[in-house]
Amino acid sequence: MISLASDLALWQMLALTGVSFAVGILGGFIGLALGTIRLPAMLLMGMAPPIAGGTNILVSSLASLSGAIRHFREGRVDTRIVLVMGIPAFAGAFLGGFASDLVSERILLGAAGALVFWQGVEFLILVRNRRSDSGAHMFGADLEGAQGDFTPKRMSLEAGIGFGVGVLGGAVGLILGSIRLPAMIRILRVDPRIAAGSNLFIGFFMGSLGWVGHVARGQVDYALLIMMGVAAMLGSWLGARLTGRVELNTLILAMGMTLMIVGALLVWRGAVG
């Protein structure tokens, strides 16, 4: 039977709700669930890691769903990306769950964090190059309004990355949209706004696959889930609304800075366990 009792004090639940709302806005804006940012806050409040992880992945799914619906309504979800990268990612996540004991989680998290951090640096370089008009655009000069380059070679590479990220995410229990997002922009050469919407759409289904086991084992704080979930959904909806209203450089800058923070958090989590 589901219990709405929580081990946290009311002030702790309210603080985490505020964090969830703010993270939801940022996540909806740049197209990431950002559970990697919410989870440390939950652990700092003294939550047991299994309960924090189970609650967090459900909140991530709800936030992704809300933002994805908004992006879809505004035409920023490309079904080709969802199919090409999403389906292999789902299969990879399923297999990754069985492979979680084969390689140290700390090594996987550290490697993923280093990659995400570097991708954030590349995004900041891209913003600098776009502003200086140097012509050295790392992801191409035609990002604004780009509908993507869906050649067989690029789609095959994207599908392979989707599968690999799915395996890694399934092994460590994370959605890892922070790796998929730059890959969409780099390989498919699609407008970051479309990448953001499509990535959230994939993130919702990835999170939905991940929460089943936590629910079955009772690793969810339902009272906190309701508070954080509603706040995350509202924040993600508002953030997704901003995506189509800001200058592209501002969006890419926000993506880059967030990826660097997420990468650093993943490296830290891999280092301390």
Image (cartoon, rainbow, N blue to C red):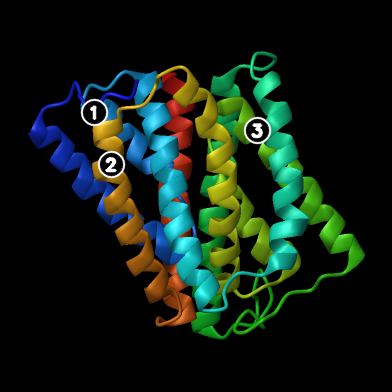
Out of 139 and 44, give the one closest to the viewer: 44
The quadrant where residue 54 appears? top left
Q: Are marks 2 and 1 in contact (CB under 8 Å)?
A: yes
Out of 119 and 36, give the one closest to the viewer: 36
Residue 181 higher or lower than 149, as above or below: above
Tag 3: amino acid: Leu
Q: Determine whether the residue tagged by mark 3 lies in a helix, strand or loop.
A: helix
Q: Name the residue located 91 percent from the left edge and 64 percent from the top edge.
A: 152
Q: Determine whether the residue tagged by mark 1 lies in a helix, strand or loop.
A: loop
User: How far separated are the C-alphas under marks 3 and 2?
Assistant: 28 Å
| Residue 219 in view of the camera | yes
**Residue that mark 1 sits on:** 4
- Comes first in the chain, label 3 or label 2: 3
Tag 1: amino acid: Leu
Of circles 3 and 2, the one toward us is: 2
Task: Residue 36: give its label.
Answer: none
Q: Position of residue 55 (x, y in %)?
A: 37, 32
Q: Position of residue 97 (x, y in %)?
A: 65, 24
**Residue that mark 3 sits on:** 168
Tag 2: amino acid: Ile
**Neighbourhood count class around disc 1 (C-alpha, 10 Å): few under 14, some 14–19, many 20 upward:** few
Q: Position of residue 116 (x, y in %)?
A: 55, 46
Of circles 3 and 1, the one toward us is: 1
Q: Position of residue 201 (x, y in %)?
A: 57, 58
- Comes first in the chain, label 3 or label 1: 1
- Comes first in the chain, label 2 or label 1: 1
Q: Quadrant of the C terminus?
A: top left
Q: Is 175 left or right of 12, judged from the image as shown? A: right
**Residue that mark 2 sits on:** 226
